[in-house]
Amino acid sequence: MNETSNYRKDIHPLKEHSSFHKMIKKEGITLRTISVFQKIIYTHYMDHARHFPWRETSDPYKILVSEFMLQQTQTHRVIKKYEHFISMFPDFPSLAAAPLKNVLEAWHGLGYNRRALNLKNTAEIVVTQYDGVLPSHPDVLITFPGIGRATACAIAAFAFGTPVVFVETNIRTVFIYFFFTKKGTVKDKEILSLVEKTLDRTNPRHWYYALMDYGVMLKKRFKPLTKKSAHYRKQPPFKGSNRKIRGKILSVLIKSPVTESHLIESIDAPVEKIKRNLLKLEEEQFIKRKGNFIFIG
């Protein structure tokens, strides 16, 4: 952080918005307005920083695991699984060598099981192609399965301190709140430009943590902010979804291989939907068949 010890402790984050908005309207994005914005964000972070085990390490492997887990999943659910997963698979070689069944068992409860498969496949690539060392550049990270631009940049910032530019849901909320009060719909392209201009390049790791924590606070108080994003999409219902059926199939198979007929009897869903999801899981190499039995591959 940039001299955070000098930041005023009496700044109330929400009260500051009105005066900051007037300053931006009058001056635009200047060194002074950027400095004030950083002070507001860092002051809140000093007093209200969230503490997670993945923030207490700079180990690229552990940060990679956390970023996969945090995709579309709230932190309170991740924290329950993260430490157990790390204890089971403490590094790239152990995860790469582990049977998929064991990985899915450790992942069970987080949902979106494809992330676990992608994480294991990524570990295998790191071990076989990069001598067990995670590349630091986002352009390389984005080539790994399950890693998009935002995740690649987050890993680069948090594991390697690289001053990259990215947006995720909480960061998006902060910039909408401070810079787009009067605008109806905001595109990420507009936000990214401001993220780049206001980035603390000396310590991007803590700056992004601070932005995220401020965004969490804002979302608790101003939930409609998220909906101003042009990229906002309401998550479809989990009940009756293919995602739920896939999860149930894998939950049964984690315990032991079973026949297709036994699997169909075990899951409360239309037979055709179960069969379609079985075919999809087989295509994605989650499951395999041997004789009459289906098992995790």
Image: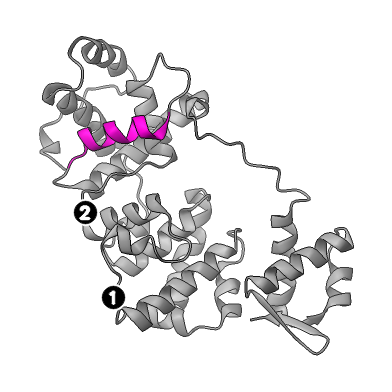
Q: Which residue is drawn at 83% across and 73% down?
A: 263
Q: Residue 273 carries which label?
A: none
Q: Where is residue 294 in the image (x, y as percent from the top left)?
A: 76, 81
Taking 113 as reference, is 48 left or right? left
Q: What kind of element bears circle 2?
A: loop
> Dots 2 and 1: beta carbons under 8 Å?
no
The reply, left or right, for residue 273 in relation to residue 9 is right
Residue extent of the magenta highlight: 187-200
Quadrant for the C terminus, please: bottom right
- Residue 163 is situated, as x and y percent measured from the top left of the image, at 21, 49
Image x and y of residue 63, in percent: 35, 62
First reached walking from the N terminus: tag 2 or tag 1: 1
Q: In this view, does 270 lie above or below 59?
A: above
Kindly identify the residue that appears in the image at 32 percent across and 64 percent down.
140
- Residue 162 is marked as 2
Height in image: 153 above or below 136? Answer: above
Report, in whole angstroms, how far the alpha carbon at label 2 lies from the one at label 1. Answer: 17 Å
Task: Using the image as rendered, state which of residue 113 and residue 48 is in the foreground.
Answer: 113
Would you say residue 5 is visible in this rendering? Answer: yes
User: Where on the picture, by quarter, is residue 269?
Assistant: bottom right
- The residue under the point 53% across, 34% down is 232
Magenta-colored stretch includes residue 166: no
Q: In the depicted view, which residue is nearer to us: 290 or 51? A: 290
**Which residue is denoted by mark 1 in the rendering?**
133
Q: What element carries label 1?
A: loop
In the displayed structure, 84 sits above or below 56; it is below
